[in-house]
Structure formats: structure tokens, C-alpha cells
Amino acid sequence: ERIGDHAMNICEYSKRLDDQKLSFSDMAVVEIESMRKTCLEAMDSFKAMEPFSQESLAKISALEEKIDDMTDSYRENQLSRMKVKECSHETSILYSEMLTDFERIGDHALNIGEALASM
């Protein structure tokens, strides 16, 4: 349910961008797409690895760590883009909110993995 809440938030940010005719920089779009793919890979790990094992947990843990690292790196990139006025404050806020939601999806995926591994 919580993962769904974060996914809905991301959809709402996308709709707000569209409604207000705002857009991310090309690089920000690439970064968001990369986060999306990594989160989907973490979620797909649940169905690809049945029965769930410590190996499955290790994979999800590595993906969650990758998502955390990407979040930190992408936030720094966004600050750099803001400094050179490549993006607006408004789009930067939405971008940051999206990163936070993707990062939380990774956290929840790891929590689910830990629960499955302990069964």
C-alpha cells in the first residue's frame, strides 16, 4: 500500500508538470527514468525469485543501496543545474519530491524483502 502511495505521488507530480506546462531538463528526465527502472527492477525481484531466499534479499539490498546512491548523486546534479539556471525552482522542487518517493519505494522494497526472508 505504501509503495502505491509513493507511485501515486509520482503520478501527481507528473500531472502537475503537464498541467502547468513545466518540464525537466533532458538530464533530469534521464535520471528520473533511471530511478524508475531501478525501482521496477527491485520490485520485479520478488516475483523472479520464488521461493524467496537470502540471495534474493541480497539482490534487493544491493538495489536499495544503488537507489540511495542515485538519489544523493541526482540531488547534487540538480543543485548544479539550478546554479546555472538550467531549471526553475518549481521544477526542482517537483524533481526532489520524485526522488524522495523513488527512494522510499526502494526502502519499502527492502523492508518487504527482509520480511519475506525471515519467513
Image (spheres, grey):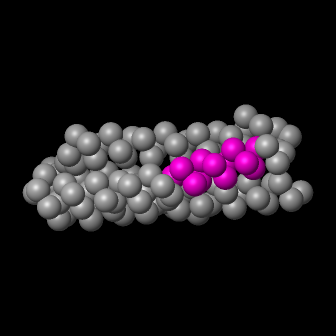
Residue 64 placement (x, y as % from top left)? 59, 53
On the rendered structure, is 26 left or right of 95?
Answer: left
Name the image quarter holding residue 110: bottom right
Q: Nearer the viewer, residue 15 or 52?
A: 52
Residue placed most toward the observer, 10 or 38: 38
Q: Is residue 24 above or below residue 72?
A: above
Q: Measured from the top left, where is residue 90 in percent x and y?
A: 19, 63
Residue 27, picture quadrant: top left
| Residue 114: quarter of image | bottom right
Is 61 covered by the magenta stretch? yes
Residue 38 in sight: yes
User: Magenta residues?
Assistant: 56-67
Q: Is residue 38 above or below residue 96?
A: above
**Is residue 8 at least partly visible in the picture?**
no
**Looking at the image, which is closer to me, 71 or 102?**
71
Instruction: Look at the picture and state if 97 lies above or below 67.
Output: below
Extreme residue toward the top, this view: 48
Residue 106, given in percent of the width and then of the height, sits at 57, 55
Q: From the viewer's perspective, tell me whether residue 92 is left or right of residue 87.
A: right
Q: Residue at x 77, y 37 (%)?
A: 49
Q: Main secondary structure of the magenta part?
A: helix
Q: Residue furthest right?
A: 119
Question: Is the N terminus in the top left, top right, bottom left or bottom right quadrant?
Answer: bottom right
Residue pictured at 21% horizontal, 57% vertical: 80
The quadrant of the image that shows the C terminus is bottom right
Instruction: Name which residue lies at 74% across and 54% down.
Output: 113
